[in-house]
Amino acid sequence: MPIKPFALQRGDTIGIVTLGSPPERNEVETGVKMLEDMGFNTILSRNVYARDGFLAGTEQERAMDLMHMFANPQVKMILPSRGGVGVAGILPYLDYSFIQRNAKIISGYSDMTVLLNALYQFAHLTTFQSLMLVDFNPNTPNYNFNQFFSAVSSSTPIGQIQTPPDIPLKSRIPGNVTGPIVGGNLTSLIGTIGTPFEIDTRGKILLLEDTHEPINTIFRYIEQLRMSGKFRDCIGIIMGECTECDESYGKTYEDLINEFIVPLGKPLMTNLTTAHGTYKTAIPIGAMVNLNTFNNTLTVLSPTTTPSFY
């Protein structure tokens, strides 16, 4: 059974880390102010503002910042400032046994996907594909905040996932399967294939989404997942959005789903608002979910956090 972190409450401390690419200082300052206005305390890691080209410091420095947050008894939740690239590089430097003994909420998306899945696989920790610090700004829809806080602040199951009313889920291949949900950003996941940290889809429901990639590149990634057995091993598939994914050679993202995902024959749902889209559904990586494409529902069955006691 996956480990559930303690639920987040007002007055708790949130640790801010940068684990991939460097953020802009104003983005960090805006996010910190919003969190503090909401009633949370914040702590910044040593290398939050570190900058070495497209990376925020060395792999060891970024891994150390994350481990320090897991070791800090004051910190209740760890919130990455942003994604970018380079998160996979910290994975060999993490102490997964220590993390398992010091479970905490951690949320993110984009390149953070590889960390979320690794923490579930190796530390058995439920993680959250949901908001990062850059999302704590006045332009973020209330839907995203409601999704985030429902996931990280309640010790009861999230229940049926509700997308915005004008963006309904779409069932494509009929089926009714139950299992842990894994996955996230396709580009980031592909980068771990062939490493000790590649995603394990055996008996799992696989979620995929992406952004700013041409469709022929998305096809290449899907082919690599297929040839590496990830579609064979999963029990169901959810295709999230591919935002700003340009048509290639006359083919669209929808064409790709119809021509290469539908023929896999696995229970399939599409149109889930995820990660890089305007609306961000909170997905608890490692939680038990039911994918029912007969009645067009995706339901989180197990609690994703445990009650906090003070």
Image (cartoon, grey):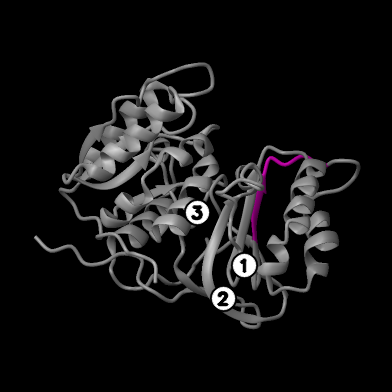
State the image coordinates of residue 231 (x, y, percent, origin top left): 71, 64
Quadrant housing the C terminus = bottom left
Per the model, the C-alpha gap separating discs 3 and 1 is 24 Å
- Tag 1: amino acid: Leu
Q: Residues within 10 Å of mark 1 (few under 14, many from 20)?
A: many
The disc labelled 2 sits on which kind of residue?
Thr
Disc 1 target residue: 169
Q: Which residues are magenta?
A: 239-247
Between residue 53 and residue 283, name the one nearer to us.
53
Label 3 belongs to which residue?
A: 117
Task: State the separation of the CA atoms marked 3 and 2.
Answer: 23 Å
Q: Is residue 269 left or right of residue 121?
A: right
Point out residue 100 in the picture as x, y percentages from the top left corner: 32, 56
Q: Mark 2 and mark 1 in contact (Cβ < 8 Å)?
A: yes
CA neighbours of label 2 inside 10 A, class few (<14), some (14 to 19), many (20+): some
Q: Residue at x 43, y 43 (%)?
A: 140
Q: Is residue 241 magenta?
A: yes
The kind of secondary structure element at disc 3 is: helix
Depth check, front residue: 28 or 64: 64
Q: Is residue 282 visible?
A: no
- The single residue placed furthest to the left in the displayed view is 310
Residue occupying image coordinates x 64% and y 73%: 235
Q: Secondary structure at mark 1?
A: loop
- Kindly identify which residue carries mark 2: 297
The local crowd at label 3, few if under 14, some if 14 to 19, many if 20 or more residues have their Cα within 10 Å, is: many
The local secondary structure at tag 2 comes to strand
Quadrant position of residue 72: top left
